[in-house]
Image (cartoon, coloured by chain):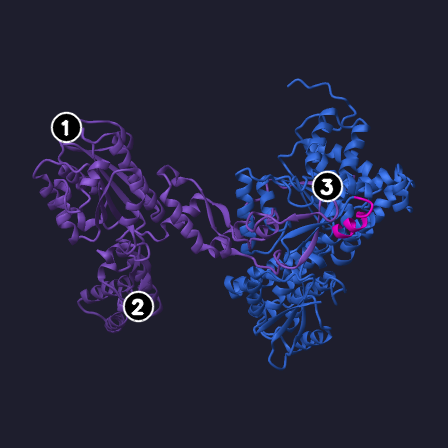
Chain colours: A purple, B blue
């Protein structure tokens, strides 16, 4: 029939409300941020890549309308389902706040007191979560503040250094000028000279020949003069390749994960470390276009391994932390500090061969810290230990050694964790925006 | 797959739908709707959409096009959460009062549901939209989609030109006054969007012909003298008190710029467009439910749908018209589907099989058998309030056990003022009708004056009925919004009418 027809819209683009959603999120930004921060406390790490249901006070996004106050005046309402009432029956009102079951209309329009609940997508959640966290030295080499520059061709100029001379352009200009100014060519001159020599070789030239010689000499002089004011190459012809220094964003980061895998590091410790690395990775991934991760594990010697091995295979041996730092510097040669933002995250239970801590500090001071954007050291303890070491100044050898040199480097952070729930607060503390100012 | 030997008469035998069965079913449905019920409809445009698209449609009043505003994003966020957590299902359909009449069917629906939805939306609602006097008078089915298209583009342009915040401030304020942005009683001076659209189209055409990129300055910042003169003439024509506050502000506000007036006008027009729907919930849903119920049963009687389909239909139908009683935890007022459907079935009964009581109450229709004509007349000429006042029968009040409760805020007790008995029928019917009178349950606020040459204070008056004042929770917030639009002090007085 012609009166009706079907249209299949299922293939139409979805997300028509995306624009409205962004407007809404922007509008409720402050409240949403509060809600996100609150929800972080009870959030387990695994949930970081999930959306989050949050609830904000509906007041912030209320759409007020004039409404009649249900608490004032009189009205008459018809209900269905009468069982025992007769006309004139009086029924005591339920006490205030007991819910009359008539609140539907008010909350529907969003001006009720209750909260407004909705779900944030993972992206939205993370964006808000990261908003006030920034890696400390991003200030120094952040995306906005561009450090490295590259020279880019920018056409030709009339001045420059001889090494940049553009031969083709120069010669073309010269050629054109020579043609325009009728510069006598060398061959033309040589032909005339040849003829002159022939004439001069004649022992007794006739009057006609003498006249020709004179004529040639005059011509040659004229040509010489011409060639002098129309040189083969004039400074006017010379062109140079121009280069302009163009800032290049450093959009790549490399993250070194150093971990002690000796016997003293059990599954629990590794698991904690892994969560910390994951979060750091997630953070870097959002900041940089490209993030490389290098895994270096160490016992008494260090090696670069893949992720699987890093987290799951065991090794026995002593513990020499400085080997990992040496290894890191060796691998770092693949990542030039001018092109890569270097982040180092080290996890350990804090034990190292006696005397090694001093060497670690040396390496850090001299080689690692100057090229690193950020160096995070986390010491994984068990909960009992954490209580014992509640004072930041006491601790294992490595901890104490780091404590002494840390103040010199604002981009160095060290902290202790014992349970998964410690990680988030620690993470925030480590990367808090004003950390540098506070330090 | 072994095909089940299907009855060749059946228009579908599978719960999965495809376009072939949809076509067959639609043909069977429209045969009943047009030749038996003799419905009068706009052409149908039935669109199959996914659940995400349904959610999208939800957030913007169900319109296929809507301008951008954060509140739609908020509604979307809420609906999405409720839907994804399983607290709330999606409607099976959305239907739009436009010509052609656009109905959305969700792809998740079973074939039976698609049949139900087509009968409900594309014939029931469609007939109501086309014939009910409120819709005919106050909305323009031909013009709404082009108008919304214009509105969306215009607002986007304004956002580009003046920034999100500027536009948002005006829209927020105008939205707060949406309920006070309609003409309830007298026709607006220029309601028909067709004229306006024609004017706009002519202007657009003229611009196209004289297009010059350098002159592309729309939306313009200042109005020229001619426009100003025209607007002030309109202001002078407004007779106070004026019930349409948005209209008054749009014309008379001393501070709004032309593009801001246009935004206010857009909000006002959208509000006006939805105004008839607010007044005909019971009738509109009742009509659609009655139609789908009749058609589905007729399909079954004609052998065009099977046992399974009719059982599935009855299951969803009965949940649609379920009316919990007042002491049920699920109770949240009267279900318009239930009331409308029950009343219309009741009218059919009165026409076909009246009792003495019905003959006494409804002498004109009882026993005539012409229920089709009676219903069509009702659908065309009534709104909820008048429909209930006219057609709610004692029998229905009894079977729903209706009773009226008088509630005075000052007293500690409520009083049962009438029940479903001989003495109470009229009072119950009266009170129920009043509940659907927008004039009673929405505040009646009017512009009483504004001295445009003097202090420029905008005076509003709330005609208080039965001592029902405005709630303080929102009053001040809305007044602040009005001040944004008016630019000067706003004074609201609440006094008994």
Question: Left or right: A318 with respect to B323?
Answer: left
Quadrant containing the C terminus of chain B in the rendered view:
bottom right
Residue B487: in sight, yes or no?
A: yes
Residue range highlighted in magenta: B421-432
Q: How many marks?
A: 3
Give percent across and percent down for residue B349: 85, 38
Residue at point 74% right, 21% down?
B6
Which element type, helix, strand or loop, lies under badge 3? helix
Q: Are marks 3 and 1 on the same chain?
A: no
Tell me if residue B427 is in the magenta stretch. yes
Which element type, helix, strand or loop, lies under badge 1? loop
Q: On the image, numbered disc 1 is attached to which residue?
A: A317
Question: Label 1 lies in what chain?
Answer: A
Which element type, helix, strand or loop, lies under badge 2? loop
Q: On the image, numbered disc 2 is attached to which residue?
A: A183
Q: Which mark is residue A263?
A: none
Foreground tag (2 vs 3): 3
Dominant secondary structure of the magenta stretch?
Answer: helix
Q: On the image, numbered disc 3 is attached to which residue?
A: B338
**Comes first in the chain, label 2 or label 1:** 2
Label 2–label 1 contact, CB within 8 A? no
Mark 3 Cα within 10 Å, few/some/many (few <14, many 20+)? many
Question: Label 2 lies in what chain?
Answer: A
């Amino acid at each position: 029939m012609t009166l009706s027809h079907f249209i299949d819209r299922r293939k139409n683009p979805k997300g028509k409300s995306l624009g409205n959603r962004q407007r809404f999120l922007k509008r409720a930004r402050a409240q949403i941020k509060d809600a996100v921060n609150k929800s972080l406390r009870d959030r387990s790490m695994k949930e970081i890549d999930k959306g989050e249901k949050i609830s904000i006070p509906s007041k912030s996004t209320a759409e007020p309308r004039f409404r009649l106050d249900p608490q004032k005046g009189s009205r008459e309402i018809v209900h269905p389902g009468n069982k025992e009432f007769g006309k004139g029956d009086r029924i005591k009102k339920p006490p205030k706040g007991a819910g009359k079951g008539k609140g539907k209309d008010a909350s529907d329009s969003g001006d009720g007191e209750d909260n407004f609940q909705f779900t944030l997508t993972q992206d939205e959640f993370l964006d808000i979560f990261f908003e006030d966290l920034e890696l400390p030295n991003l200030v120094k080499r952040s995306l906005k503040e561009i450090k490295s520059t590259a020279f880019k061709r920018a056409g030709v100029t009339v001045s420059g250094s001889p090494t940049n001379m553009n031969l083709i352009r120069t010669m073309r200009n010269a050629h054109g000028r020579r043609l325009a100014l009728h510069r006598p060519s060398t061959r033309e001159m040589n032909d005339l000279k040849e003829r002159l020599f022939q004439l001069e070789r004649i022992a007794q030239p006739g009057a006609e020949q003498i006249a020709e010689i004179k004529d040639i000499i005059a011509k040659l002089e004229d040509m010489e003069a011409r060639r002098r004011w129309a040189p083969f190459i004039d400074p006017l012809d010379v062109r140079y390749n121009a280069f302009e220094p163009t800032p290049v964003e450093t959009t790549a980061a490399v993250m070194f994960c150093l971990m002690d895998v000796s016997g003293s590091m059990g599954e629990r410790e590794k698991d904690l470390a892994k969560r910390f690395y994951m979060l750091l990775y997630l953070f870097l991934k959002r900041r940089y276009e490209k993030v490389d991760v290098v895994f270096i594990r160490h016992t008494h010697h260090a090696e670069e391994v893949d992720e699987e091995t890093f987290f799951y295979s065991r090794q026995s041996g002593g513990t020499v932390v400085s080997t990992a730092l040496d290894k890191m510097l060796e691998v770092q040669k693949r990542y030039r500090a001018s092109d890569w933002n270097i982040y180092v995250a080290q996890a350990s239970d804090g034990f190292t061969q006696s005397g090694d801590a001093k060497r670690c500090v040396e390496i850090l001071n001299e080689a690692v810290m100057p090229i690193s954007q950020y160096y995070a050291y986390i010491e994984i303890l068990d909960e009992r230990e954490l209580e014992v070491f509640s004072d930041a100044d006491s601790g294992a050898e490595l901890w104490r050694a780091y404590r002494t040199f840390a103040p010199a480097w604002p981009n160095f952070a060290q902290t202790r964790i014992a349970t998964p729930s410690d990680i988030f607060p620690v993470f925030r503390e480590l990367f808090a925006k004003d950390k540098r100012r506070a330090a | 797959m072994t095909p089940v030997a299907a009855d060749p008469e059946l228009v579908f035998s599978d719960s999965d739908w495809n376009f072939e069965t949809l076509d067959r079913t639609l043909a069977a449905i429209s045969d009943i709707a047009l030749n038996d019920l003799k419905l009068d409809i706009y052409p149908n445009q039935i669109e199959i959409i996914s659940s995400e698209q349904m959610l999208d449609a939800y957030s913007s009043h169900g319109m296929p096009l809507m301008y951008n505003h954060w509140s739609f994003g908020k509604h979307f966020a809420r609906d999405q959460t409720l839907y994804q957590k399983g607290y709330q299902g999606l409607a099976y359909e959305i239907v739009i009062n436009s010509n052609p009449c656009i109905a959305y069917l969700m792809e998740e629906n079973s074939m039976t549901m698609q049949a139900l939805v087509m009968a409900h939306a594309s014939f029931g609602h469609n007939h109501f939209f086309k014939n009910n006097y409120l819709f005919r008078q106050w909305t323009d089915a031909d013009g709404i989609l082009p108008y919304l298209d214009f509105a969306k583009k215009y607002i986007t342009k304004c956002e580009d030109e003046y920034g999100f915040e500027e536009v948002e401030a005006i829209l927020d304020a105008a939205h707060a006054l949406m309920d006070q942005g309609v003409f309830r009683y007298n026709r607006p001076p220029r309601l028909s969007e067709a004229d306006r659209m024609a004017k706009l189209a002519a202007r657009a055409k003229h611009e196209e012909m004289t297009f010059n990129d350098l002159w592309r300055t729309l939306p313009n910042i200042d109005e020229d003298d001619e426009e100003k003169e025209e607007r002030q003439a309109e202001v002078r024509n407004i007779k106070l008190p004026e019930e349409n506050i948005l209209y008054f502000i749009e014309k008379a506000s001393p501070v709004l710029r032309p593009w801001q007036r246009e935004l206010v006008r857009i909000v006002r027009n959208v509000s006006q467009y939805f105004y008839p729907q607010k007044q005909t919930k019971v009738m509109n849903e009742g009509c659609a439910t009655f139609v789908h119920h009749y058609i589905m049963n007729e399909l079954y009687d004609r052998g065009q749908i099977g046992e399974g389909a009719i059982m599935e239909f009855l299951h969803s139908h009965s949940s649609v018209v379920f009316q919990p009683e007042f002491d049920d935890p699920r109770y949240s007022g009267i279900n318009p589907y239930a009331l409308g459907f029950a009343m219309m079935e009741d009218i059919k009964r009165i026409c076909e099989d009246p009792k003495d009581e019905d003959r006494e109450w409804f002498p004109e229709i009882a026993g005539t058998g012409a229920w089709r004509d009676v219903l069509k007349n009702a659908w065309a000429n009534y709104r909820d309030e008048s429909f209930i006042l006219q057609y709610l029968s004692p029998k229905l009040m009894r079977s729903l056990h209706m009773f009226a409760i008088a509630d005075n805020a000052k007293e500690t007790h409520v009083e049962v003022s009438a029940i479903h008995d001989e003495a109470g029928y009229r009072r119950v019917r009266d009170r129920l009708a009043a509940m659907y009178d927008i004039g009673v349950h929405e505040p009646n606020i009017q512009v009483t004056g504004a001295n445009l040459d003097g202090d420029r204070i905008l005076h509003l008056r709330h005609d208080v009925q039965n001592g029902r004042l405005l709630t303080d929770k929102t009053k001040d917030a809305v007044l602040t919004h009005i001040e944004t639009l008016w630019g000067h002090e706003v004074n609201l007085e609440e006094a008994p009418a």
